[in-house]
Image: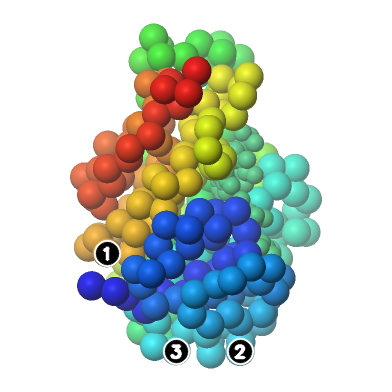
């Protein structure tokens, strides 16, 4: 069944992948501080996610929020992640709960666990014959301040779920690229997320029933150090791509 979905950060790359795959499948309200540069489905709200009143208005009639808006740079400075990623995410959750939204899918990141990639483990853990695997039950171990902001977003989701019952899924996205995996970059190949698997994964976030989840958002790569088992079990994720098929 089609759902009424608010997509924040709609003008970005992940938003592009989602809309390419799902434009006709749901009723869309798109939000971004940048105006659209291409055709888009539904309506488009040009706003900053830290503008509380506008975010509240954008929640009206919404079933599911896909919250992507934020500073995606792994080198992002603290003032930017504090404003855009932490304060903005709190504004989105607060407005979602008050509006009676059923589910929020939060774009978390591999960088929430970046410091598991120790000198001793790398580069072996990026290779298919290594069995090191993170499954989402491990404690966060952010690799930079951007990663800290993603852990904060996951924690905000935990609080809003436990306090108000809203369903929350945190998708620790790997490395999204169009068409083929990153070239000459073993780490990026191990955490590749194709455009069509990205759209399918967020479709499952919209449609599946869950309480509070942390899943890894990568394709079914032969080389992987993130498990996709929880995404399969909790969401019904069935990826079709594999970075090893692009060598
Ligand atoms: N692209 C990737 O491989 C990965 C992306 N992510 C996360 O996914 C989300 C989307 O990332 P991308 O699409 O790659 O980044 P992007 O930079 O292409 O898109 C982000 C969008 O959010 C908007 N935005 C940023 N701050 C905003 C604010 N305060 N108010 C309203 N809009 C705002 C920007 O205008 C931009 O259109 C981010 O939260 C990022 O951290 C996580 C892991 C990997
Ligand atoms: O969280 C993110 O991760 C991806 C992949 O990380 P990288 O260390 O391989 O660059 C990155 O491309 C994206 O911009 C970022 O938001």
Marks 1 and 2 sit apart, C-alpha to C-alpha, by 28 Å
Q: Earlier in the sequence, mark 1 or mark 3?
A: 3
Is the residue marked by circle 3 packed among few (<14), some (14-19), or many (20+) residues within 10 Å? some
Residue in front for this viewpoint, 153 or 4: 4
* In this rendering, position of residue 153 left or right of residue 101: right
Provide the residue designation for mark 1. Answer: 207
Element at badge 1? helix
Marks 3 and 2 sit apart, C-alpha to C-alpha, by 11 Å
Element at badge 3? loop
Please give the name of the residue rendered at 27% of the width and 64% of the height, measured from the top-left corner.
Answer: 207
Provide the residue designation for mark 3. Answer: 60
* In this rendering, position of residue 223 left or right of residue 229: right
Q: Earlier in the sequence, mark 1 or mark 2?
A: 2
Q: Residue 121 in the image: x percent, y percent?
A: 52, 14
Is the residue marked by circle 1 packed among few (<14), some (14-19), or many (20+) residues within 10 Å? some
Q: Residue 69 in the image: x percent, y percent?
A: 60, 63
Marks 1 and 3 sit apart, C-alpha to C-alpha, by 19 Å
* In this rendering, position of residue 49 left or right of residue 7: right
Q: Residue 176 in the image: x percent, y percent?
A: 54, 42
Please give the name of the residue rendered at 53% of the width and 33% of the height, measured from the top-left corner.
Answer: 180
Position of residue 178 relative to residue 104, above or below, is above
Answer yes or no: do the residues labelled 3 and 2 have beta carbons within 8 Å?
no
Q: Earlier in the sequence, mark 3 or mark 2?
A: 2
Q: Quadrant of residue 183?
A: top right
Provide the residue designation for mark 2. Answer: 53
């Amino acid at each position: 069944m089609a759902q009424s979905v608010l997509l924040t950060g709609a003008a970005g790359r992940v938003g592009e992948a989602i809309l390419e795959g799902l434009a006709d499948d749901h009723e869309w309200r798109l939000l971004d501080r940048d105006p659209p540069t291409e055709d888009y489905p539904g309506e488009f709200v040009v706003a900053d996610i830290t503008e509380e009143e506008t975010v509240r208005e954008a929640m009206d009639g919404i079933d599911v929020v896909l919250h992507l808006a934020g500073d995606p740079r792994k080198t992002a400075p603290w003032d930017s992640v504090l404003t855009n990623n932490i304060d903005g995410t709190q504004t989105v959750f607060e407005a979602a709960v008050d509006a009676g939204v059923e589910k929020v899918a939060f774009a978390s990141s591999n960088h929430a666990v970046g410091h598991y990639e120790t000198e001793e483990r790398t580069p072996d853990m990026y290779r298919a014959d290594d069995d090191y695997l993170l499954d989402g039950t491990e404690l966060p171990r952010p690799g930079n301040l951007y990663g800290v902001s993603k852990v904060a977003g996951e924690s905000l989701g935990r609080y809003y779920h436990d306090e108000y019952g809203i369903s929350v899924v945190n998708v620790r996205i790997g490395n999204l690229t169009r068409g083929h995996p990153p070239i000459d970059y073993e780490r990026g190949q191990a955490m590749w997320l194709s455009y069509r698997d990205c759209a399918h994964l967020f479709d499952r976030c919209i449609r599946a029933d869950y309480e509070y989840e942390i899943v890894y958002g990568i394709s079914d790569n032969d080389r992987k150090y993130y498990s996709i088992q929880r995404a399969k079990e909790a969401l019904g994720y069935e990826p079709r791509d594999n970075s090893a098929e692009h060598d």
